Image: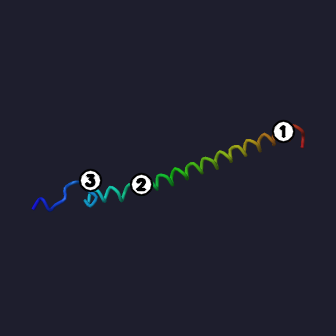
Amino acid sequence: MTMLIETDKNHPRSIAHRNVDVTGPANTRSAGIRQFGLCALAAIVSGLIAAAIIALQTAFYLHSLHY
């Protein structure tokens, strides 16, 4: 009777092998989307900081010329 039961976890048709394959790509994809979102957010924030620095420098320059 034990010969009819598949106990090898590396066998392609075993239940343990199927469960590992199903959850692997889903976690990888969500991590990739999260990484892309964080990178885009960092680029936007750094652009806003650069624009704020340029605006402050312009304001100080115009103030010193009495405009």
Q: Earlier in the sequence, mark 3 or mark 2?
A: 3
Which comes before the other along the chain, label 2 or label 1? Answer: 2
Q: Amino acid at mark 2?
A: Asn
The residue that label 1 is drawn on is: 61
Of 44 and 13, nearer the camera is: 13
Q: Residue 35 in the image: x percent, y percent?
A: 52, 50
Q: In the image, what residue occupies the spot 63% across and 47% down?
A: 43
Q: Residues within 10 Å of mark 2 (few under 14, many from 20)?
A: few
Mark pair 1, 3: CA separation? 70 Å
Please tell me in which quadrant of the rendered image residue 5 appears: bottom left
Q: Residues within 10 Å of mark 1 (few under 14, many from 20)?
A: few
- Residue position for label 2: 27
Q: In the drawing, what numbered circle is on residue 10?
A: 3
* Residue occupying image coordinates x 89% and y 38%: 65
Q: CA distance from mark 3 to mark 2?
A: 21 Å
Residue at 60% across, 47% down: 42
Up/down of 38 relative to 2, above or below: above
* Label 2 secondary element: helix
Query: Where does residue 46 sit, x and y in percent of width and height?
Result: 65, 45
Which of these two is toward me, 23 or 14?
A: 14
Q: Where residue 13 sits: x, y (%)?
A: 26, 61
Q: Amino acid at mark 1?
A: Tyr
Q: Quadrant of the C terminus?
A: top right
Per the model, the C-alpha gap separating discs 2 and 1 is 51 Å
Front of the two marks 1 and 3: 3
- Left/right placement of residue 12 relative to residue 60 reads left
Of tags 3 and 2, which is closer to the observer? 3
Instruction: Answer left or right for 65 relative to 7.
Output: right
